[in-house]
Amino acid sequence: MKRRDFLKFVGVASSATVLSSCGVEKASDKIVSKLIPEKDIIPGEAYFKNSTCAECAVGCGVSVKTVDHNAIKLEGMTGHPLNDGALCLRGQASLTRLYHPNRLTNPVVPRKSDLNLERMTGSVMEPVSWEDAFKMIAENLGGASANNTSNVYLSGRTTGSLSAMIDDFCGRTGVQRLPEYETYSYANIRAAYQALFGRNEVPDYKIADADLLVTVGADILETFVNPVGFAKQVEAARSNNQLKWTHFEPHVSLTGFKASERQSVQPGGEAYLLLFLARYFDANSVTNRSMPAALKNSLPNVSDNDIAANTGLSVDELNQLAQNLASARNPLLIVGGVSTQQANGYEAALLAGLVQWLSGMVGNTIDFAAGSDYSKVGSLKDIKNLVAMLDSKRVHAAFVTRTDPLFRTVPASMQVTDKIKNAAFKVAFVETIDPADEKAYAEIYDLILPLSHAYESWGDVESRKGLTSVVQPTLKETIFDTHTEGDILMNIAAAVSGAAVEGTYEDWLKARWDASGATDYLMDAGYYQADVSDGRVALSGGAARAFSDANIAAASSGNTLYVVPSIRKLDGRSGDLQLMSEIPDPLSTVSYGSWVSVSKADADSLSFERAESLIQKYRDEVAVESAGVSMNLPAWVQPGLAQGIAVIQREQIDGSMLAYDDRTGEEYARIDNVNISRTGNVVPLAALAGGIEQGERSIIPEPGGGHGHHGKVHFEGDETLYPDPYDRYTEYRWGLSVDMDSCTGCGACVSACYIENNIPCVGEEEVFNGREMSWIRVQPYYNDQGGMDSLVMMCQQCDFAPCENVCPVYATYHNEEGLNVMVYNRCVGTRYCHNNCPYKVRRFNWFDWADEGYWDGPMARMQNPDIWVRPKGVMEKCTFCIQRIRVAKDHAKDEGRLVQDGEVLAACQQTCPTNAISFGNMLDKNSEVYTRTSQSEGKFRVLDILGTGPAVHYLRKEEEA
Amino acid sequence: MRTIVPIILAGFFGTMALATFAMSAYWETYEKVPDQPIAFPHDIHAGDLNIACTHCHQYVEVGKQATVPALSICMDCHAGMQSDKPEIIKLQGYWERQEEVAWQRIHTMPDHVYFSHKRHIKAGVDCAECHGDMTVVNTVKQVRTFQMGFCVSCHRANAASQDCWTCHK
């Protein structure tokens, strides 16, 4: 047979095969008639339910986007006093906890007998019924009175009705409620305010009212007290009061880079800096407040020159700072973070309180009436007491809930993990258990009860005094056989007394709301603001005594290691959310794994093999040694760090190196005399940035380079030989702008994008292969002036998109609204588009992530039904949340009009705490995106020189030039 | 070459014949209507009794999905009406047991397709355009291919949007 005949034959045969297989495949699935139609819910259409984020203790209000009783997305609750519409990256990702593959599905009793087996197979967890579990607890609680010991209840920070329920439960069953444990308990700050004003509290810092903000160590944009709210307030103060913001820190943090000015201070020098300010305010009578003589005499006697030497700042600089604070109308000083978590951190907090009082901030920009409620939170002192009780076998039954049940966050020297075994009966309430930790759980606990997630529960949170936020279920029923903590406690109490359970926690809660008149507010608005007590405070007569044993000893020499909370995982509590490992750290772009940040100077003196920031898988490994403990970690060379300073994130360190303050129980973030040496190895580190310096690429052009055209946006009046692309747009031309001055680089947009668009996490191995799937990323670019720009990069929707004209199958094309659209099921996976994109924003599905297990189990319920889950072999990318545009157009069409400005919020824009992203119709000259873009003098488009004509503008003030 | 031509021809027609057989077998299953838990006659309800489609498919004008009615809607009439008929006894059995009815789905869209009933109803598309005349059929079956060509031809004829992302997602 000739070749041509063979081809004919094959052609005919294959066409016959194709013909025979055409037609619609029969559907086999079912469509269900419910019993009665659901009220106010249209099947398949999204609706929002108010609730409260439970990922940390801040208690931001959320609107849970729900479709057919599946929560699919979290959005910050608009108008909520704490976060007003915004949510951080952990908050966005917290939805994955609801559907987490490691959720504990039912009560379990660990089989302790199996623990000694050499080769354990399967789970050591034996399921029990709830009834048996309650009975078991009730029986064991009785043991305490028999042998003269007590039962204890240890939890993480608890507020609102649940706190009242725990008190009620403890009262009824004779359980002792211990002070709560939080890794970041602000113990020094609270103790200082207690000594100065008699208020053991974290006050409300009213940044929005300030015109001068001085922060010392407090990472207000990352983890300090209420980072989302603070970011919002910084933005408000910047636009309303022309806020000037100076940040002092011994290490580097995102907050430092995003302040107007970042100043390095020597480790331990913060207390000296504050002492200078306190003396200045007292001596110059800036306000009518002055120090009583006793207090003045008890202040440490240090000369100005010594202060200058210890802070690393000159006396002139210190004077200038003090003068600025004195002359500002509404100054605000916030001291916290690493500056209060060190040997002289308590002194720093005391002096800070003194400065705040002397300068008139207390009562003006610092408000004790609406402080965060930390009244039940203890410190490591209380953990020490617990250990003492356990040591002397005075604990019979122990409940551990909403805090790390394995106590890995507690300094290892306290040995809680071992000592807790002295209690006769240990119960943990948990949401998830990592299979790798099962054995560790089994070694400690006798019973483990699964908690319902917040979005399956009724509850409330009162994280700020007087402000109650509702927690309500969004799912029809719990995913697994779980209960809320309130219900569990009511059942245990009933089992103890032998009486029947008095209704549910929901009933109890609602009766409590009714009694306080909060029900209507909570159910309609989602939060309730009660009257708060007077916030006026006076300097306590005993304040001087606090300073009597104050010691602001000089900073130590040698290398210093800072252990800082992570913006992604805080103290490690969000570490079990894979998304928080997948999304890179905003400063280093490291996604998976641990690392230590070292300075360029140290890298040079240790003669690193791989000090360059260019893309590379392997980095130098260093050994970090302190107090006989050594850790080997890959090193990240962090621009801006001073020589001798290294930084590691709190969740990456085990407790063995950590120490704490005996006076207040505050954990130290600063470890002195650390030895850092090169091991000689190079080890892989998953840093995603191709390069953290721009070099010659001019990605972010020099300010004043003639890029901005005031009053115009780039596409207007661009002279070109080609037809004006804007002629093709008639109704809409979707455009987006990112304000570089407002953006804090926090990464909330990235997290929101993942959840909104069904983007999978690919895992560490595939991240190393460069196969991460994020449609939007935040790239840090460090400059020679010691600054850092965060560049938010997503598909630029180019007018002359290089990706479009290389697609062989017309899977990507430019639509009539200026969007560079991707028809996913048309894509055949040539990846030409990806090769031709200068922005690296297209992502290819190397695997079917459903097959890889990402969407296994309940995770599939999180999928946004408005956008497809792309299979293997398909390219995908950002299309400005086109599915949201579709919903808005649908509504607009019902009303016979065009989509109005503000009707479509892209997911990244919606969650942004500083409103840095605006999005809308560029043809509408009144739209926010158009006005903001046209008014920005220093606006630019990334790689504009290529002539791609991006629809994304980056805005900034020209004055930076 | 001479010997090869008949072989090719035989091969071609043989294959086509085979394909025809295959397709006839396929069309049979295609035409076959799945058994529903309760035999619901559309011709009686929509035809003889002239009940509006929206009486039962109550979300068709407001949402993407037309949806099947909740049992309470059936029971509005059938709590007392025609109670002696075997299919109604079945229906009442479900209601008494408070059991939801899982129907065999007839019409379906792939996951990558966006389709909104509301938009089509508001544009004045008659239900029968896609679903056939329900006032005369006793048992529902799919009468259109619901392939892309079917959608696009109608969009073209009515000057509706032909942007890919109007329907693809």
Image: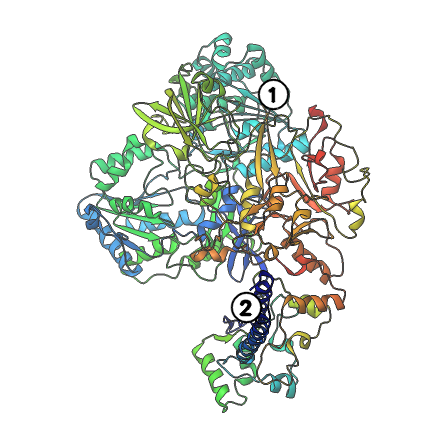
Q: Quadrant of the N terminus of chain A?
A: bottom right
Q: CA distance from mark 2 to mark 1?
A: 60 Å
Residue A125 place in picture, x, y as percent:
28, 53
Q: Which residue reaches farthest bottom? A: B84
Crowdedness near tag 2: few (<14), some (14–19) or many (≥20) residues, C-alpha within 10 Å: few
Residue A718 place in picture, x, y as percent:
80, 38
Q: Can the viewer see residue A780 in this picture? A: yes
Residue at 60%, 15% in the rendered image: A320
Occupied quadrant, residue A661: top left
Asked if residue A199 lies left or right of residue B112, the reply is: left
Occupied quadrant, residue A865: bottom right
Residue A745 place in picture, x, y as percent:
57, 35
Between marks 2 and 1 in the image, the one whose residue lies nearer the viewer: 1
- The answer to whether residue A157 is above or below residue A649 is below
Q: Chain of mark 2?
A: A
Q: Amino acid at mark 1?
A: Gln
Q: Are marks 2 and 1 in contact (CB under 8 Å)?
A: no
**Colour mode?**
rainbow
Q: Chain of mark 1?
A: A
Q: Quadrant of the C terminus of chain A?
A: top right
- Numbered mark located on residue A951 in the image: none
> Disc 2 marks which residue?
A38
Q: Which residue reaches farthest front? A: B2
